[in-house]
Structure formats: C-alpha cells, structure tokens
Amino acid sequence: MGRLGVTEILVILAVVLLLFGGKKIPELMKGLGSGIKEFKNAAKDDQSADKKEEETK
C-alpha cells in the first residue's frame, strides 16, 4: 500500500461528488471541520490535564 497519487485522489473526489452531489459537500466539509476541531480541543485538554497531574506529584 503506497501513498495516494493524483489519479487516485481525483477518482475519490469524483466518486464523492457523484454520491453526495454538489449541494451536500459543503455541509459534509463543515461537519468534518468541526469534528477535527473538537478532537484537537479534547487532545489539548487531555495534555494539559496530564501536565497538571505531573506537577502535583
């Protein structure tokens, strides 16, 4: 399994466009972006909790 090339990415984008249509894609990207943002915030909170725990030892 190598890295994705330009052709593979274009095929994936074409399939997504056909499945969801042009109107749904911005909604999907917005949801994906907010999910990534929540994940980063949770990871940051977890790291800060770990640092506080280490400082109290």
Image (cartoon, grey):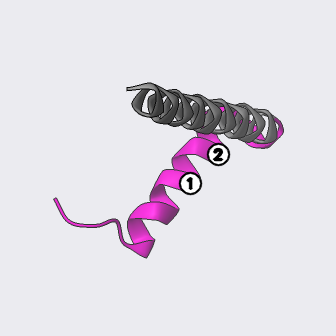
Image x and y of residue 46, in percent: 51, 28
Q: Is residue 38 above or below residue 36?
A: above
Q: Is residue 56 above or below residue 28?
A: above
Q: Residue at x 59, y 39 (%)?
A: 40
Q: Residue at x 20, y 66 (%)?
A: 2
Q: Is residue 15 above or below residue 50?
A: below
Image x and y of residue 57, in percent: 37, 26
Q: Nearer the viewer, residue 14 or 54?
A: 54
SS label for mark 1: helix
Tags 2 and 1 touching, CB below 8 Å: yes
Q: Residue at x 48, y 36 (%)?
A: 51
Residue stretch in magenta: 1-23
Q: Which residue is mark 2?
A: 17
Magenta span includes 31: no
Q: Which residue is mark 1?
A: 13
- In the image, taking residue 3 as reference, residue 56 lies left or right, namely right
Image x and y of residue 19, in percent: 60, 34
Q: Residue at x 53, y 46 (%)?
A: 15
